[in-house]
Image (tube, rainbow, N blue to C red):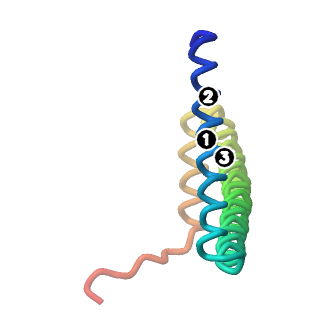
Amino acid sequence: MSDLDTVFAAGQAVAAVHTAVDQVINAALFYGPGALALTATIAAFRACAWAADRYHQLLQDRADRRAYTARAFRLCRVADSADAVLALGDNTVNEYLDNKLAATPDLAPEEGR
């Protein structure tokens, strides 16, 4: 973007602001100050509603990041535990898994019921 483009962009911005101010003045003269005040109130309400939604979205994003971080930490702990068990050797790993299977209650429904 050259300096000339910057000048043109600034000119367009000034023209847009001038047009907006001109429209507000025309609306105030045509409709009266009551309509202008109502429009300003509605715009302020919408801006506050948008800000509140954005704030709640930010809080939800933080909560999601905390949950993902906790889940990743637990998965790393499981991986570390699995690595420690697998480092014991084949016979010890089989014995460890058999003991875990025996200690785990069978919560699956029986077939045929």
Q: CA distance from mark 2 to mark 3?
A: 52 Å
Q: Which type of secondary structure does the marked residue at label 1 adopt?
A: helix
Q: Residue at x 55, y 74 (%)?
A: 105
Residue furthest to the bottom: 113
Q: Amino acid at mark 1?
A: Thr
According to the image, label 2 marks what residue? Answer: 11
Quadrant housing residue 28: bottom right
> In the structure shown, which secondary structural element does the residue marked by tag 2 occupy?
helix
Q: Is residue 45 left or right of residue 5?
A: right
Give the amino acid at mark 2. Gly
Q: Judge the density around disc 1: few (<14), some (14-19), many (≥20) Cα neighbours within 10 Å.
A: few
Decide which of 51, 84 is in the foreground and name it.
51
Q: Amino acid at mark 3?
A: Ala
Q: Give the vertical position of 86 relative to 3 (above or below).
A: below
- What residue is shown with label 1? 92
Residue 72 is marked as 3
